[in-house]
Amino acid sequence: MNLRAVIVLLMLWLVHAASGYTTWDGKAVPPMADPVNPVICSTFVQLYMAVRTQVPGRVIVLKPGTYDIAAVAPLRLDSPNVTIRGLSDDPSAAALVGGGFENCANLEEELINLYTRNTTIANLTITECRCNALKFQGGVNDQTVLHNVRFLNVGERMIKGPGTTNAAQCSIRYCHFEDTKVPSATRCGSDATDSDGNYIAGMDIMHATAWVVHDCVFRNIRGSSGGGRGGIFFWGGSPGNANTDMIVERNTFIGCDRAISYGNPSGTNCVNGGFIRNNFIVRGAGIGIEMENSTNIKIYNNTLYSTDPTYSRAVYFSNNFTGNEFRNNIIFGNISGSVTTISNNLSRTSSSDATTNWFVNRTNADLHLTSNATAAINSGAPGLVSGDWDGHGRIDGQCDIGADEFNSVGVQDWGALSVGSDAGISVMPNPFNPTVVISVGINAVGAYCPPSLALGETGNTPLQAIIYNTNGRIIAGLVLHNGQATWDASAQPSGAYVVRAQIGAKNLTKVITLVK
């Protein structure tokens, strides 16, 4: 290893040791693996040249600082497997800055354009852009990963995916989408599309497949008169532009004109297949969950709070097709329209409901349940989702309604187990890439003792662990030897998985995270 590589690794180790990052809503962001042979940048010129001379597999690391790219934007990424990431785990430390939220010199300003696949953008801020901060511009944009990216003050779309491109298996995780500014009602240079200052959104995506948007925050994405588009806005303007199998889970929305929109009135065939589950939503000016012109969408275990539960369209359904379900949700507000299956929801529609102390902190979108939420606790239809907003397992026979499983915890640590009486799952490391060691057993005075019987076995049937993906599908079955097995997830996409095992009558679950 040469001296430069040693210095880079030492810098990264010092940064990780001193930082780590927690999202606005309190989630620890899994650290990424240290880069291999990175190009280290500390100035705008170095960044520009690193992008201009990009080659497949290049890793560009930004030292803390402000990188004003307005004069050369958009940065064009057209080589596969390129990464741009901040050196620090704090995304605010390195910022790509455009010409301004309301700039009139470049009305169509875009900061990053993708013409390639397997792109990773991580641990940085993209801010002060008039039009699109990140655009899926052309070609095949599969397996794009946005990890711990902070989008701040973008005048139209923070992420834009038009119908002219393809993008499959993209992961948007632990990202922060926020505007602290509101567009003017008479914006300079506005065309008919944005004549009223409401043409603004967090994500506006068409023609995508199997995206997972998880553990992100969406704050105050608003139009000039409360008519902004969704924090998440998936739609298709024509049958060929539909999105397929899109998943939105464990996110927090607060103060957005719309929170989650699958489809809109001007679409035709917007989203075919997918989930909206385990999200915390504090409704802003308008709709919390919107679904139109969509098929086979499962909306499970979300919590939507509104200071005005009398609002007529907290949830809005219109002109949908078959297979849509709305189940196990808490809604402070009215549900307008209908879908194929609506069942087991709690809808609070009285003005007095706004003072109901069901949640830990409604002001900051902390919608974890309190003991006052007796109507929701242990009242849910089981089996719809395997975890909650925190990623804690729903292991009771009858889960709670809403995004939080009351008083749930991560799977027990060894130290919390009673001597010889309780069992648990231990995984190392977590997050992992690509292998993880899974241990299942009984704690006895701090020593690991594999159980003699598990999964209803008799005789010498071996203990097993089952791996599920976030759709509830079985991905792998592992036979444990002396209580342990190693899972190699090289063939699986990044994201959360659930490990399940059983010792006697005790069900055990553990959420693990693959970060590539």
Image: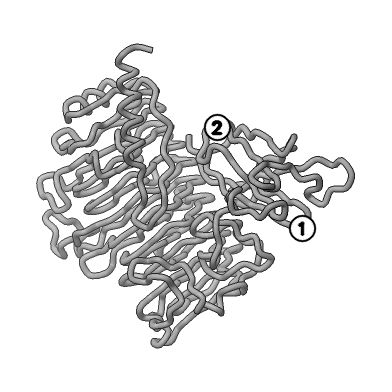
For mark 2, does the 10 Å Cα neighbourhood hold few (<14), some (14 to 19), or many (20 or more) residues? some
Looking at the rendering, in which quadrant would you find the N terminus?
top left
Name the spot of residue 175 as percent of width and height, x first.
Answer: 36, 48
Name the spot of residue 274 as percent of width and height, x first.
Answer: 54, 54
For mark 1, does the 10 Å Cα neighbourhood hold few (<14), some (14 to 19), or many (20 or more) residues? few
Q: Which residue is mark 1?
A: 505
Closer to viewer: mark 1 or mark 2 = 1
Considering only order in the chain, which callout, 2 or 1, is on the residue closer to the N terminus? Answer: 2
Please, which colouring scheme is shown? one colour
Classify mark 2: helix, strand or loop: loop
Residue 30 appears anywhere in the view: yes
Q: Is residue 385 above or below residue 52?
A: below
Query: Looking at the rendered structure, which numbered label has been put on residue 434?
Result: 2
Q: Disc 2 residue type?
A: Pro
Q: CA distance from mark 1 to mark 2?
A: 31 Å
Q: Is residue 350 above or below residue 174?
A: below
